[in-house]
Image (cartoon, grey):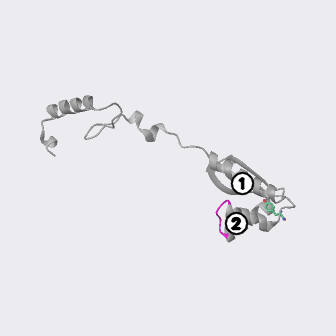
Amino acid sequence: MVLVSVMPPLLSQLQVQLQASLPPNTPPHWGQQQDTATKPRERLKKPPLYRVLLLNDDFTPMDFVVDILETIFRKDHEEATIVMLHVHNHGVGVCGIYSCEVAESKVQQVLDYAHAFGHPLRCTMERA
Ligand code: TYC
């Protein structure tokens, strides 16, 4: 509050002195503009997203697929049934959209779970 009433040239002189006395990488504050080209929001790209896909087959039981959609993809019973029937009727369907690491983990969980029960269920991922 006191600084607001200081004459502008004196204020900027104080800012220069203060900044020089701070450790490197101290974020700018009280009135200092940050260079827009270095704003983190503009420098960081959003990570790519991936669709996790279930593929149809003639052997995996419908109930098993619904169970996978509920447990691994956190869908309620109605939504899981809709997705399972979509895959059954169209050959492929989207279980969810995730970051690369999460999508890879979901695919692996599906394949491990299906393999453990002897079902030939296939699951893959693609760039969204
Ligand atoms: N087509 C399977 C059946 O008739 C059911 C099924 C649905 C299998 C979806 C795989 O991803 C799948 N038992």
Residue 47 % position (x, y): 57, 43
Residue at left offset 62%, top offset 51% = 98
Q: Secondary structure at mark 1?
A: helix
Q: Which mark is residue 22?
A: none
Label 1 to label 2: alpha-carbon separation: 17 Å
Residue 116 % position (x, y): 80, 57
Sequence-earlier tag: 1 or 2:
2
Quarter of the view holding residue 10: top left
Tell me: 46 left or right of 63. Answer: left
Quarter of the view holding residue 39: top left
Q: Eyeballing the image, is 38 above or below 87?
A: above
Q: Is residue 9 magenta?
A: no
Q: Eyeballing the image, is 15 above or below 101?
A: above
Tell me: 94 left or right of 2. Answer: right
Q: Is residue 75 magenta?
A: yes
Q: Which mark is residue 109?
A: 1
Quarter of the view holding residue 66: bottom right
Q: Which mark is residue 80?
A: 2
Q: Residue furthest right?
A: 58
Q: Secondary structure at mark 2?
A: helix
Residue at left offset 68%, top offset 71% = 78
Q: Is mark 2 within 8 Å of ligand 1?
A: no
Q: What secondary structure prevails in the magenta region?
A: loop
Tell me: 87 left or right of 98. Answer: right
Q: Residue furthest bottom?
A: 78
**Residue type, numbered disc 2:** Ala
- Residue span colored magenta: 72-76
Mark nearest the camera among 1 and 2 is: 1
Q: Quadrant of ligand 1?
A: bottom right
**Residue type, numbered disc 1:** Gln
